[in-house]
Image (cartoon, rainbow, N blue to C red):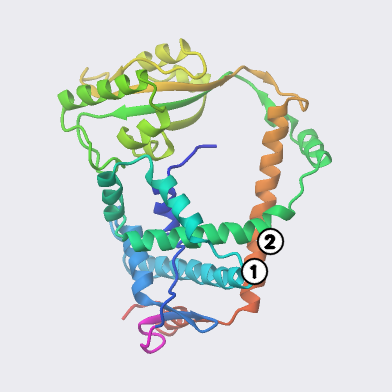
Amino acid sequence: MRKTSFFVRAGAALSGAVLLAALAACNSQAGGDVMATVDGRKIPRTDVDKYYNNNVASAQQAPTGEQATALRLNILHQMIDDEILMRRAEKLGLLATDEEVDRKYNEFKSPFTQEEFDQRLKDKKITLVDFKRDIRRSVTVDKVMNKEVSSKINVTDQDITDYYTAHKGEFNLIEPTYHLAQIMVTPAPNPQAHNQNDKAQNEGDARKKIQMIGNRLDSGDDFATLAMKYSEDPETSGNGGDLGTVPESSLRNTDPFTRDAVVKLKPGQYSSIITVVNPQTKQALGFRIVKLVSKEPAGQRELADPRVQQAIRSQLHDRREQLLKAAYYEVLRDSAKVENYYAKRVLDTNGVEK
């Protein structure tokens, strides 16, 4: 499973799965500036709009019409769910403490300089107050779910055996696989790249930058942290450069310089600087450093293999947890008094925003 940086997770969590709901009262009329209420607590339009704008900030084309309305409905729905859960947390005495919030904040901030961190908040169109409030809500949600759902899930040895017996073919690798990560630098700035403050502007800059990264790796700096801070591949930089698992056949189809470098690596090692060349023009498309995280040989994985057992246990646990969380939210919703004025207005206007 790929790891993700907080700012990638936050991009989703603060937009499609918003964690912030209104705590302050709003005196405007319901259905106008108030989009919903949960047990009398109001969710104002300003909060919904804030995370709507956050969601569309990085989109190449902002949604319009029905798409924009659907996105606001989804954001509001999640805000309602989170407010319901916060009410539950109050009753259980599980609201996040200041110490827990500060600890998580420092964890998120530690890989970045103050300038880089401030830039990321600016790019997400949120303030530090918003950010910390969302941390508080996120930690609170985790605490409630761990107590009410996750801690009650038990995957037995028999569950694991039954799954393996029914899906034995899934554990038969027909070819070796490579778990790879990369740090990529390109000659031209990529607007989708996460490292907003240090993009190479041309081939010369790119060569200097990748050499600097190589030097820091040689000095013992963490590969994933450097990828998150400096890699210009928008698909992997937020994940610490994680490319996931690649079968040997796919590796054979990549550029020969990368392929030759990877097959010489041992797990945990990283390559020297690789120049990625356009085969037609022979021009440099970029420069990368590749790390071999692990390698798995072909063949049947047996149930006795601890990695097989752990993979099955995690899969069964995650699947059951997802189901139970969905059911838990439904139960909480049934016990809450929710008024979704925005949804009613969408229905009354036949989906046409006024």
The quarter in which the C terminus is drawn is bottom left
Does 28 lie within the magenta span? yes
Looking at the rendering, the stretch of residues picked out in magenta corresponds to 26-34
Quadrant of res 25: bottom left
- Front residue (pair 116, 100): 100
Q: Is residue 317 above or below residue 26?
A: above
Q: Nearer the viewer, mark 2 or mark 1?
A: 1
Q: Which residue is mark 2?
A: 148
Which residue is at 29% across, 40% downward? 195
Question: Which residue is drawn at the image coordinates 36% and 84% (left, top)?
Answer: 32
Q: Residue at x 41, y 65 (%)?
A: 71
Q: Could you tell me residue 148's position as x and y percent?
A: 68, 61
**Res 313 seen here:** yes
Q: x%, y% of residue 55?
A: 36, 59
Q: Give the amino acid type for the residue marked by disc 1 in the picture.
A: Leu
Which residue: 57% across, 68% down?
85
Q: Nearer the viewer, residue 192 or 344?
A: 192
Identify the disc placed on residue 92: 1
Report how far apart the C-alphas of labels 2 and 1 lie in the structure: 10 Å
State yes or no: discs 2 and 1 in contact (Cβ < 8 Å): yes
Q: From the viewer's perspective, tell me whether residue 231 is left or right of residue 265.
A: left
Quadrant of the rendered image containing residue 194 = top left
Residue 274 sits inside the magenta stretch: no
Vertical relation: 317 (above or below) 336: above
Q: Is residue 91 left or right of residue 258?
A: right
Category of crowding for the residue at label 1, using alpha-carbon neighbours closer than 10 angstroms: few (below 14), some (14–19), many (at least 20): few
Percent x, y of residue 31 = 40, 85
Residue 299 image position (x, y, % from top left): 68, 18
